[in-house]
């Protein structure tokens, strides 16, 4: 009850509005732009995390190297570091006069206060989801399978593509979806680096906060309902994927 | 959804199989290139931001750093954060243990719904978690008129901060305990009861000791999130300096006022908390694996 009841107020609140009024608020130009930015950047970040998350998980499971345990522990940093702290640190780094931003500026790449900055923040918070989903599956995958493939004449690349990848695909998709789910709701780490220009770099969760601070509760609720529905959908996909993954790996 | 926080059980079990794997097949050059790419990626995206926090905090030396932390509003933020986290973690230990106990040891209708509900705060934006309390208890909210008539302040006050934090951090303890309690089953409890133990005795002397490490692990993660929570708390706080500003909110205010050094000084305390959490997490995993 404790969890369900507060979230139910969103439904009750929207019931006070006529469906057409709700629709108009939820699909205003600024709201539509914020969805596009939120979902676009979340998708980009989740894709980057899928590639590098698999790489990191692979290295952690298969390659013993000095400092591996430290690297393994560091992967959880985004879970432990408060989002606001990550936000100001990334903004400082990627600002035009920042340590990384100053190096990208001559190349014509502007990260802070742009769509790219939002993606960088979302990569930060989403990475552990992919690593921690793929890692246990890789650990249960015996290296002997690849050895068998190699004995049969497969190159290491082919063995990876034909033996390892099919086994981790369900976990990889789950990790991608978890990272995406976390990204669409993310607020703290994004708002500093985004610059928050309406229609350009304003994410949907921020627009909810802005509407609340203007006491436009109906506007805030309309956008929140859209985001909530998106979260439910993603949650549904995650549950399906995890069931598939469990069947595939027999865990 | 348990992978979201990585349960102690599965992590500690898989840990031992690490060393048995050896790289075979690909040449050393390929192996070291892959390791380098992974390490460089993690350095750029995780390590450098962390280092930046401390570097910026101490940019003008130790004296200004200490002064920034001793500033009354900063101290008030630290006190408030500790208070909110203490209340929230205590409440979620009670709720989490109760929910996990009910789910793992009893059969009842709607159990899968309850499990989904526990996961919900993980997948909902923290901003929305805060919003629902404004809609419930805000001036124009559901109970707004009643609360105003009785002079009870929830939103823009401590109760609101605690409610938002409890909702956001609720899954941590429960999620950690459910798989472990399910795995342990009910035999030990049944044995205790058949030997004459009361329900409470069984709980405190059998059930609770059996899950102590997982509980501690859940508390650790719950506390880290409670102290660092930003989105949900930001919506219900009202941002009154020295009164309803937690540390993460104080970091934001200072940053927006271009007081970067002071902002990073407060942020460095939170980063330190994150580091302590990570170290304690590794230690707990080791401890649980050795038992």
Image (cartoon, coloured by chain):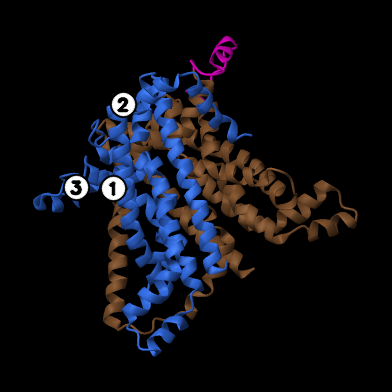
Chain colours: A blue, B brown
Q: Which residues are magenta?
A: B139-157
Chain letter for the residue marked with disc 3 in the picture? A
Q: Does A152 lie within the magenta span?
A: no
Q: Left or right? Give the position of B95 relative to B247.
A: right
Label of residue A241 in the image: none
Where is residue B191? Give x, y as percent. 85, 59
Rendering quarter of residue B29: bottom left
Q: Which of the two marks, 1 or 2, is nearer to us in this view?
A: 2
Rendering quarter of residue A95: top left
State which quarter of the image contains the N terminus of chain A. Answer: top right
Do pointers 1 and 3 mark residues of a single chain? yes
Q: Which residue lies at the image location 74% right of the left edge and 59% below the top edge?
A: B185
Where is residue A243? Give x, y as percent. 54, 58
Answer with mark 2 or mark 3, whichever residue precedes in sequence: 2
Q: Which of the two marks, 2 or 3, is nearer to us in this view?
A: 2
Residue at the spot of label 1: A119
- Tell me the distance, in whole angstroms, between the alpha carbons under discs 2 and 3: 36 Å
Residue at the spot of label 2: A28
């Amino acid at each position: 009850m404790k969890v369900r009841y507060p979230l139910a107020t969103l439904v009750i609140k929207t019931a006070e509005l006529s469906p057409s009024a709700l629709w108009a608020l939820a699909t205003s130009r600024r709201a539509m732009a914020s969805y596009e930015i939120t979902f676009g950047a979340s998708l980009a970040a989740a894709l980057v995390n899928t590639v590098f998350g698999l790489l990191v998980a692979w290295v952690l499971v298969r390659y013993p190297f000095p400092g591996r345990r430290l690297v393994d522990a560091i992967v959880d940093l985004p879970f432990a570091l408060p989002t606001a702290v990550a936000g100001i640190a990334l903004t400082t780094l990627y600002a035009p006069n920042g340590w990384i931003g100053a190096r990208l500026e001559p190349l014509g790449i502007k990260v802070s206060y742009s769509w790219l900055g939002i993606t960088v923040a979302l990569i930060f918070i989403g990475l552990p989801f992919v690593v921690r989903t793929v890692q246990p599956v890789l650990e249960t995958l015996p290296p002997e399978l690849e050895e068998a493939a190699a004995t049969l004449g497969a190159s290491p690349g082919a063995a990876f593509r034909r033996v390892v990848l099919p086994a981790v695909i369900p976990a990889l998709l789950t990790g991608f979806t978890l990272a995406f789910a976390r990204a669409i709701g993310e607020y703290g780490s994004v708002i500093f680096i985004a610059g928050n220009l309406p229609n350009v770099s304003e994410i949907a969760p921020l627009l909810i906060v802005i509407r609340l601070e203007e006491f436009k509760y109906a506007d805030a609720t309309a956008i929140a309902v859209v985001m909530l529905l998106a979260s439910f959908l993603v949650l549904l996909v995650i549950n399906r994927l995890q069931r598939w993954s469990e069947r595939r790996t027999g865990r | 959804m348990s992978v979201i926080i990585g349960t102690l059980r599965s992590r500690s079990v898989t840990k031992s199989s690490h060393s048995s794997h050896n790289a075979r097949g690909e040449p050393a050059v390929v192996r070291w290139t892959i390791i380098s790419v992974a390490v460089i990626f993690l350095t750029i995206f995780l390590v450098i931001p962390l280092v930046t926090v401390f570097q910026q905090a101490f940019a003008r030396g130790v004296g200004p750093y200490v002064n920034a932390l001793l500033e009354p509003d900063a101290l008030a933020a630290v006190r408030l954060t500790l208070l909110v986290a203490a209340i929230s973690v205590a409440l979620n230990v009670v709720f989490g243990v109760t929910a996990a106990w009910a789910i793992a040891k009893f059969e009842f209708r709607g159990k899968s719904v309850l499990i989904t509900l526990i996961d919900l705060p993980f997948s909902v934006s923290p901003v929305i978690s805060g919003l629902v309390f404004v809609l419930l208890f805000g001036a124009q909210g559901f109970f707004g008129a009643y609360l105003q008539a009785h002079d009870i302040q929830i939103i823009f006050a401590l109760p609101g901060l605690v409610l938002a934090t409890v909702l956001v951090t609720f899954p941590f303890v429960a999620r950690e305990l459910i798989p472990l309690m399910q795995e342990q089953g009910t035999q030990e409890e049944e044995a205790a009861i058949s030997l004459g133990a009361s329900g409470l005795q069984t709980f405190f002397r059998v059930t609770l000791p059996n899950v102590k490490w997982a509980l501690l692990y859940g508390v650790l993660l719950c506390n880290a999130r409670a102290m660092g929570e930003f989105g949900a708390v930001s919506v219900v706080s009202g941002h009154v300096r020295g009164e309803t500003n937690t540390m993460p909110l104080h970091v934001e205010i200072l940053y927006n006022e271009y007081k970067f050094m002071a902002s990073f000084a407060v942020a460095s305390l939170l980063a330190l908390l994150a580091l302590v959490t990570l170290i304690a997490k590794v230690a707990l995993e080791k401890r649980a694996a050795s038992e």
